[in-house]
Amino acid sequence: MTSTEYAFLKGHGTENDFVLLPDLDGSIHGDLSADRVRALCDRRAGIGGDGVLRVLRHQGDDAEWFMDYRNSDGSIAEMCGNGVRVFARYLIDTGLAATPIRVATRAGVKTVTGTNDLTVDMGAPTVLAPTQISIAHHFWQATNIDMGNPHAVAFVDHLDEAGPLLEEPIYDRDTYPNGVNVEFVERRGERHVAMRVHERGSGETRSCGTGACAVMVASALDDGRGPGETYLVDLPGGRLTVEWTLDDRILMTGPAVLVAEGTTTL
Ligand SMILES: N[C@@H](CCC[C@H](N)C(=O)O)C(=O)O
């Protein structure tokens, strides 16, 4: 910890909540240690969040911004779908950028468009060989989808089948050597599903944007459909709309709001 004061903001996308750290030229937060991320995300002793979004300018032709995303346990992840909308909301509200905004992430450049609800072009999904997950001797077949970060999607009759999700589901370590985000999906209607998620590095959260995209792709495939479809995905924290375009891109649309700003010594 340090006694220096730093600016922060707090925001969320469908209640997937984040601490934002503006660090435009990268001079403020140095390496941003896992300890500091955990302290910032602590819901009792810190600001509280499912993760940290560090806002950096990007030196490159393809994007002007870089989203340095960290899970609440301090681990680094490739991509955060809700986070990139909240990141863009910060840039829009401060006048630093206007849509379309190209944001570099560890999973490539994502373009954000829109005004109120924001849409992210998440790129192409990668569907891999099916896998299996389990919790307390209950096993589910799972669709293995990479959205820049890893996902295992399991269909259930009722979302409460997954139990309290206090612990990480058991997964195949050879399939997911760096861990996995696990989604449970219940059918709600035609092109309409609901999900819960246990996020790698954050536990059960109220929403996961990359998870919603993985769930849409798994659901469409399970329905015998493919590109050219749009699904509604309900999460405990709200609703995301996910379109799989004919040219194999996933467009995710949902809210992004900033709720507080201040300074912190954490
Ligand atoms: N909540 C995010 C995903 C954040 C990263 C994930 N926990 C991981 O480790 O891959 C989203 O909205 O996509």
Image (cartoon, helix red, strand yellow):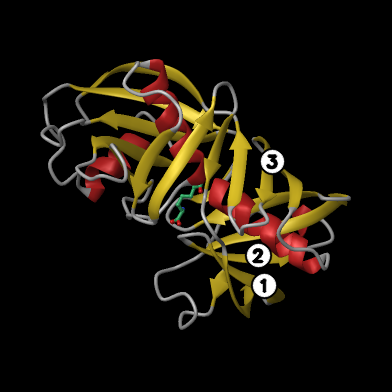
Residue 23 vertical placement versus 245 (above, below): above
- In the rendered image, the quadrant that contains the C terminus is top left
Furthest-bottom residue in view?
Answer: 174
Q: Which amino acid does label 3 sit on?
A: Thr
Side of 219 relative to 86 (left or right): right
Q: Which mark is residue 142?
A: 1
Question: What SS does tag 3 mark?
Answer: strand
Label at residue 241? 3
Mark with earlier residue (2, 3): 2
- Label 1 SS: strand
| 100 sits to left or right of 216 | left
> Marks 1/2: CA distance?
5 Å
* Residue 141 quadrant: bottom right
What is the quadrant of residue 96 in the picture? top left
Horizontal side of 171 relative to 98 (left or right) equals right
Mark 3 or mark 1: which is in front?
Answer: 3
Q: Do the residues labelled 1 and 2 touch (CB within 8 Å)?
A: yes
Q: Which residue, given by chain and number where applicable, does mark 2 sit on?
A: 153
